[in-house]
Each structure stands twice: as C-alpha cells, then as structure tokens.
Image: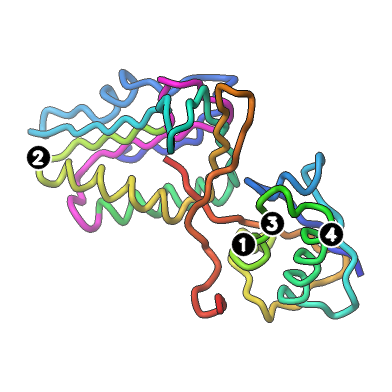
Amino acid sequence: MEIQLRLYGSSKMLSDKEILHIELPNNSNIEKLRRALNKIISEKYLKNNLQNLPKTAAFFSEADEVITDNYKLKDKELISIIPPIGGG
Amino acid sequence: MTLHTALVKTEEEEISSDKAKKFIFSEKYGAESIFIGRVRSENSGKKVTAVTYDAHDQAVTKSFQSICNDAKNKFDKGAKIFLEHAKGYVPVGEISILIAAGSGHRDEAFKICRYILEEVKHQSPIWKKEHYADGKEEWLPGHSLRPKKEIK
C-alpha cells in the first residue's frame, strides 16, 4: 500500500514536493509509518538533523485530528506530518 | 463581532496594529492591551536576516478560534480579541504575531494577551525557518503535539 504524506516545517527537507509518497506493507499503522520514516532519514537525510522527527512528530488525519500510533492507514490515504511546533 | 483571527500571507498583506486597535475599541472598555511579536536580528549567537513561517492553515484557524474563545471564557466574556499571525517570509523587524484585547479592566486585558501567546506556541501548527546572514537556514525546534503517552 501507499500513503500520501503532506509535509510541513522541517519535514519539507524530505522532498521538494508538498506531498511525499511512502510505500508501506498492507494494513500498516502510524507506528509502521514512523519506522519507515526512520529508515528513509537514516539512509538519506542524516545530515539534516532530522533523526528525531519520526519520534517527535504527530500526524493529522484529513479531518485535522491527531491520529495515534495504532491508527490503521488506508491505501492512498492523505495524512499530514506535524513536526514539533513553535510559532510566535 | 468580538473576535477576529487570521493567518496573514505575507506576500499578499501585512499585519497592522491600526487595524487591531480599531477592532478592539469600545467606549465600554477601560483597557486595551496589545502584544506585538517581531522577527529579531539575533538568535543563539547567529545573525538572523528573516524568518519563514510555515503553517497548517485549517488546523491553525481552528486552534486560533478555540484559544481565543477559551481566553474570553477564562478572563472576560465581554472582551474583544484580535489575533493575526504571519505565514511566509518575514524580514527582521517585521511583525510575526499581533494579539490585541479590549476589556473592562487592565488585568484581564494583559492576561488575555499572555494566555493567547503561550497557547499559540503550544497548540497552533506553525513552524519557523530562520535565515542567517551567512546564507544558511535552519528549522527551529519546537513543542511536540504527539500524545505524551506514546513517547518512550
């Protein structure tokens, strides 16, 4: 299955596009997505100080609600990655 | 109307303190408090030239409304509140956030501004990328919205 991850903040270093497509095993949940992100970052983006992102990011559903680690993802689902925030 | 909140796209318009003052004015109020946050020229020993603000627009809009309503309920249900935050490129010296509150008394007006500022920093999905004089840039660390029980 594939999910579409809309990028915000520091996660924009993962792609020049607004949405990153990630391949995951069928029936994956957010925890599996965190592991996949960890792999992508450790293979390609270690120099960008993104090592903590998979652990510290939250994820929003299309309804802009926080989704937890056991949330089952659907094929082609669009979710947002929310790195630690800090406006003002 | 007693509440105005907006995420202001900096390439289209700017945040205006005059607009805020007009919005919160009422002859019923004895106090107006205005907080202005600006991009400063130095952070952690680095010379800053600008900050780019990124935001999750829909979630920010929802959080601004919720935070301002909470502030009214906590401190003064009759207050008028104005909250705008920049999205996009903001050079040093320019306004990044403006919070204004009109209220019957000073204590409530001060508290409303302080409360809103702290809650925006902890609830609203907004991110800062600093641009430095040496040409480098960096996303700043922040507050995680991941449920605390999940972080091991």
Residue tagged by mark 1?
A57
**Image depth: mark 1 or mark 3 in front:** 1
Please state which amino acid type lies under the numbered disc 3: Ser
Residue wearing tag 3: A80
- Which residue was labeled with disc 4? A43
Instruction: Chain letter for mark 3, please.
Output: A
The subunit letter for the residue under badge 1 reads A
Residues tagged 1 and 2 counted as in contact (Cβ below 8 A): no
In the image, B16 versus B22, the foreground residue is: B16
**Residue found 35% across the figure and 32% down from its top:** B37
Give a yes or no on whether discs 2 and 4 share a subunit: no
Q: Give left or right: position of B23 versus A48.
A: left
Q: Chain of mark 2?
A: B
Specify which label sits upstream in the sequence, 4 or 1: 4
Q: Secondary structure at mark 3?
A: strand
Q: Report whether A69 appears left or right of A18.
A: left
Q: Image check: B2 left or right of A75?
A: left
Q: Secondary structure at mark 4?
A: helix
Picture coordinates of residue B89, whole percent (x, y):
57, 26
Q: CA distance from mark 4 to mark 3?
A: 22 Å
> At 48% across and 26% down in the image, what residue appears?
B47
The CA distance from mark 2 to mark 4 is 55 Å
- Kindly identify the amino acid type of the residue bearing the numbered disc 2: Arg
Q: Considering the image in quadrants, where does the N terminus of chain A appear? A: bottom right
Look at mark 2 in the image and give the residue it sits on.
B106
Residue situated in front as seen by the camera: B3 or B127: B127
Look at the numbered disc 2 and give the secondary structure of its residue.
helix
Whole-angstrom CA distance, mark 2 to mark 3, is: 40 Å
Indicate the position of residue B110 as horizontal and vertical percent values.
17, 42
Q: Amino acid at mark 1?
A: Ala
**Foreground pick, B121 / B113:** B121
Q: Which residues are magenta?
A: B73-96
